[in-house]
Amino acid sequence: MDTVKNTHSFKNRNIGEILEKVFENSDVNFHVLENNKVVLTKGYLIKRSVYQTDNESLTEDVSSVVFEKGKNENFIKIGRESLTKKTNYTVKGYVKNITTKKAIEGVSVYEKSTGKYVVTNKNGFYSINVPFGKNELEVSFIDYEKQSKNIIVFENGNLDFFIRETSEQLDEIVIDGNINKNVKQTIAGVTQIKAEKIKNIPLVFGERDILKVATTLPGIKSTGEGSEGVNVRGGKVDQNLFLLDDGIIYNPTHFLGLFSAVNPFTTKDVKIYKGSTPAEYGGRLSSVFDINSKNPNTTKFKGEASIGPVTGNLSVEIPVIKDKSGLMLGVRSTYSDWILNLLDKDNFENSSASFYDVIAKYNHKINDNNSLEVTGYHSLDKYQIASDSINKYGNSIASINWRHQFNEKNTGNLILSNSKYFFSIDFDDDTNQNGFNLDYNINETNLKLKMKYLHSETHNFDYGLESKLYNISPGTILPSSTNSDITPLSIAKERALENAVFLADEIKVTDKLNVNVGLRFSQFLALGASSQNFYQNGLPKNSSNLLTTKSYGNNEIFKAYHGLSYRLSGRYSLTEDLSLKGSFNKSFQYIHRLNNNTTATPIDTWRLSNVNIKPQIGRQVTLGLFKNIKGNKYELSLEGYFKDYDNLLDYKTGATLLLNENIETDVLQGDGKSYGVEFLVRKNEGRLNGWLGYSYSRSLIQFNSQFEEETINNGKYFPTNYDKPHDFSAVLNYKLTERYSFSANLAYQTGRPITYPTGKYTSNGVEFLTYSFRNQFRIPDYYRLDIGINIEGNHKIKKFAHSFWNISIYNVLGRNNPYSIFFETVNGNVNGYKSSIFSNPIPTITYNFKF
């Protein structure tokens, strides 16, 4: 029993008033009998019952007015009974891991008699309305044992749960969902993928890849194998915000887009926001991929490893201070040069390819109200494909997250992060006359304060501040030796400060209607030192129309932009398992990626808005139906969207985007729009599980000007490079036995747009090609079937390691899916050639084990 000391001062008070003050914040009830005798009870109200028989006088009945005496010993009492009682009371508290004492987000807290449930927030906090009297609360979460508590509710009170992880979870549910979560959550267009649950999906080279799995969901596409990044609901690749423990990843892929840059063994989950984005996120128009790494175990040493045909992977979790702090380390590397050695030596004689990534995360629980997380990440890719150029690119991230709980209603996070993306090209020819070294890097430092205030059951507030500093070195080229004829060139650095303040409120209007309202005001300040070109108004930006060039000093603000973003999302429950959701978003993006192809080259550069390049603006409207069948066994969703954009950046024909001192003369900004409908059906339970997804979507862009050099396709809307109207995916897993399962992955997409040569002509003895409108034609449609067999080791609990084999065949039909089509003129004839990444089946065997 807990001992609580109270200090009070009383004067001229009776014993009843004194005891009322002493026990006001406890669950102790009291009753004063004659002669000032006091009876204390645990919660129950003692009521005087007056009755009389022939042989009895007035007596005291000390049984509860509501509950039978002696039958409630196994119940937890919340508060204390009073004569004035309400119909409903609020029970709130935290759900935590019983071993690590870490809060658990997304846990369902379910009251069995009423069917009401809530889900814990990021801090593991819940608040639920229950009726007066007896209740049974049950908490459940995947990979954790269920826990139930019988309670007697007399008034508002607190109740915490501590739940235990299951020793080994071997089911095949790939994307996690809690009870009716997809129906009940207010924010539309959000998906959560758990890294642990995608191990059965057959993917290229047997590598578990959380981003590749994301592309099997409606609305998320890639331009093809070997492409970097993803396109979400018709948006550009640079319109996606990739966060790893709050640090930004600028290039989320390895090996020319074939692998994700995120280690699956150290990743907990990823939340993908493609509809309504919470107000705390800003700076991108299309989506947010919020990737969370695992929290290290603080009680025992754990690890996981895999050996595959191309990559090896190892992660370990090391307790530092028992129950308080731990360290997670992960390293992944490739040994893929042997594949290139098997290819035609004449074409791939000077070829090599490799990558690695490392991650470390340290968690420390300072006390019950304070904790600290520190994450460091670094990746490097290096490749040389049939050339004398050595290409390198990589990401580096460091982040510190301090969590503080002020009280049961107020929590806060202070986050400091630094992110860097870089690439380099080293070229040496036989004569060394053209050898050069080229470098590019972007560095971003971000400071963010985000607060959460649980005002009431009706209002939950999120608010905060954010500031980030950009430093970009757009490129430097130097001769590789004294014999090189390359002229040194360095493009002037770019700097800017982006500030934001945000506020959001989750409003429970009624039991059926929930609304999330968010505002985010952002400010962008372009900073010197810098030189900016000014051109004649109303005329194309070129050297002929240049008026003047102005120079600005260090940290001098030479251009400012600002904008107010709106975030509105609502959910109306038509029934317990059917809801209607809608949302509206407006966002601003102040940074742009420049590229003139769809291949995964590391030479795509990021540039900041300035006096000549305006910020991108995007708006999105969504509406959808979400349905669950047989509890959470089947999930169905049908969602439509429309997006429009201002100031999308694209390039002029023949543009030079790398090492261009006057980049504004080679780019254009225009309008865009995308729209579509998405359908998803998912089965979460049973021997057969998985999902089917289909989307019809369009992505269009327009450049219309009175000047021909700023007009594309006569000023009409035309398809973007990533416009693929039809997209179908099927991801299925069939459990043959407890240890053996069969998986299949089927994908179909419309071929992406392409520009074809349509004729040729001769001028002054030189032959030229004429081309169609930009993106007027399409490459052939894409389809692929992958299959896999998954073999679990035996399920003995007391063993050193639990093993898992994956035997899969990627592209089992040997489909030669063209990634691109290019043309060459040979002997006066224009010949077309198809380029593909994988034209044959790719069998792989991967061995995984946990210890």
Image (spheres, grey):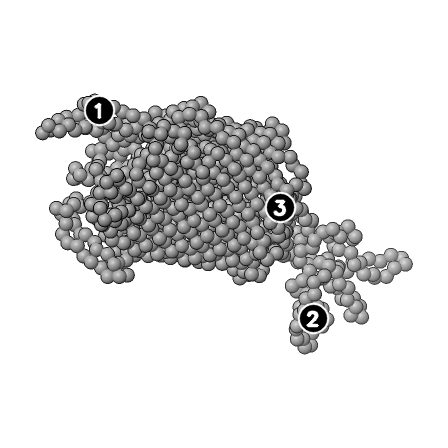
Local secondary structure at mark 3: loop
Query: Looking at the image, do the residues carrying marks 3 and 2 touch, with CB atoms under 8 Å apart?
Result: no
Is the residue marked by circle 2 packed among few (<14), some (14-19), or many (20+) residues within 10 Å?
some
Location of residue 645 in the rendering, given as x and y in whole percent from the top left corner: 31, 42
Viewer-nearest of discs 3 and 2: 3
First in sequence: mark 1 vs mark 3: 3
Viewer-nearest of discs 1 and 3: 1
Q: Quadrant of the C terminus?
A: top right
Relative to the observer, which residue lies in front, 815 or 316?
Answer: 316
Q: Amino acid at mark 2?
A: Ile
Query: Looking at the image, do the residues carrying marks 1 and 2 touch, with CB atoms under 8 Å apart?
Result: no
Location of residue 802 in the rendering, given as x and y in whole percent from the top left corner: 61, 39
Q: Amino acid at mark 3?
A: Glu
Location of residue 471 in the rendering, given as x and y in whole percent from the top left corner: 32, 54
Left or right of 608, for residue 707: left
**Residue 778 visible:** no
Local secondary structure at mark 2: helix
Location of residue 580 in the rendering, given as x and y in whole percent from the top left corner: 47, 38
Which residue is label 2 attached to? 18
Q: Amino acid at mark 1?
A: Val
Relative to the observer, which residue lies in front, 446 or 311?
Answer: 311
Q: Residue furthest left?
A: 764
Which residue is label 1 attached to? 826
Q: Report the residue at 45% width, 32% height from top.
A: 204
Which residue is label 3 attached to? 165
Q: Is residue 146 above or below residue 558?
A: above
First in sequence: mark 1 vs mark 2: 2
Q: Is residue 639 above or below residue 567?
A: above
